[in-house]
Image (cartoon, rainbow, N blue to C red):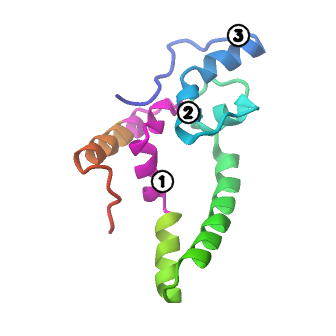
Amino acid sequence: MGVSPLPKKRICLDGKAMVEFLFNGLEEVEKTIGYIFKNKLLLIQAMTHSSYKNNCLTESYNEQEWIGDRVLGFEMAKFVSLNCQDTVDAKSATFATLTSNEFWAVLTVRHGIHKHIKLCDNNLTAKIDAFAEQQTRNGHQHMHK
């Protein structure tokens, strides 16, 4: 299936038309995560890789990723602290799993969100597609190293 391809030519539209163009298909992401964004630009930015040059309304997700990692880490630490009665080492292992890129990649592919990432990097697209195929074969299980 793959991720969203980059159009051949850069598209120049007015603000509202550009939001509609970039938001196309992202309703599925909202439906999947159970949240409707009031500011659609936040979701557009979250789904835009730095290789995608057709988005002239937002930056890539890099800044959001940095902030999101901190918020996610805090929330996962609270969750583990409140819900796990294990040793500190076991809690640390659980926290590491819940905040790992692999764990979130598995969830992203399991729910089809990867299909809506806007990027233009053939190597990354091939890696995402291969990971998605592997996950389909193994039932979307997290692979413990």
Q: Label 3: few (<14), some or many (≥20) within 10 Å?
A: few
Secondary structure under the numbered disc 3 in the rendered image: loop
Residue that mark 1 sits on: 104
- Which quadrant holds the C terminus? bottom left
Q: Are marks 2 and 1 in contact (CB under 8 Å)?
A: no
Residue that mark 3 sits on: 13
Q: Are marks 1 and 3 in contact (CB under 8 Å)?
A: no
Which one is earlier in the sequence, the residue at label 1 or at label 3?
Answer: 3
- Which quadrant holds the N terminus? top left
- Distance Cα–Cα, label 1 vs label 3: 33 Å
Figure check: 84 above or below 108 = below
Residue 58 visible in the shown view? no
Q: Which mark is residue 31?
A: 2
Secondary structure under the numbered disc 1 in the rendered image: helix
Q: Which range of residues does the magenta coloring cover?
A: 100-125
Secondary structure under the numbered disc 2 in the rendered image: helix
Residue at 71 percent of width and 29 percent of height: 40
Name the residue type under label 1. Trp
- Distance Cα–Cα, label 2 vs label 1: 18 Å
Figure check: 21 above or below 141 = above
Q: Is residue 118 magenta?
A: yes
Q: Nearer the viewer, mark 2 or mark 1?
A: 2
Which one is earlier in the sequence, the residue at label 2 or at label 1?
Answer: 2
Name the residue type under label 2. Lys
Q: Nearer the viewer, residue 49 or 2?
A: 2
Name the residue type under label 3. Leu
Which one is earlier in the sequence, the residue at label 2 or at label 3?
Answer: 3
At which x and y percent is residue 47?
A: 58, 36
Q: Nearer the viewer, mark 2 or mark 3?
A: 2
